Image (cartoon, rainbow, N blue to C red):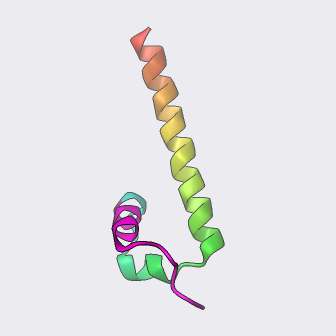
Amino acid sequence: MRPLQISPETAVKLSEKLGVPLENLMHMPQHILLQKIAELGKEQSEEDQADKKDGQ
């Protein structure tokens, strides 16, 4: 399996957000990484919606 083809800056940011060691992130299967990114996006959108409701 090839390491992911992402920039070093992106890898570091994803590693921090996902709470996964950088080495594990770089060898993570692409479909699993995409699933985790989708979960992060869903959580972020839920937080944004909650913030909008609180602001009204």
Q: Depth check: give the residue in front, 11 or 17.
A: 11
Q: Position of residue 22 (x, y in %)?
A: 37, 76
Q: Position of residue 33 (x, y in %)?
A: 56, 68
Q: In this view, does 17 lie above or below 6?
A: above
Q: Is residue 12 above or below residue 55?
A: below
The residue furthest bottom is: 1
Q: Position of residue 25 (x, y in %)?
A: 45, 76
Q: In which quarter of the image is residue 12?
A: bottom left
Q: Is residue 6 above or below residue 49?
A: below
* Quarter placement of the C terminus: top left
Q: What stretch is highlighted in magenta?
A: 1-16
The residue furthest top is: 56
Left or right, 34 with respect to 17, comes to: right
Left or right, 56 with respect to 38, comes to: left
* Quarter placement of the N terminus: bottom right
Instruction: Examine the structure image and report whether residue 13 is included in the region drawn in magenta.
Output: yes
Q: In this view, does 28 lie above or below 18?
A: below
Q: Residue at x 52, y 42 (%)?
A: 43
Q: Depth check: give the residue in front, 29 or 54.
A: 29
Query: Total of numbered circles in the picture?
Result: 0
Q: Depth check: give the residue in front, 55 or 1.
A: 1
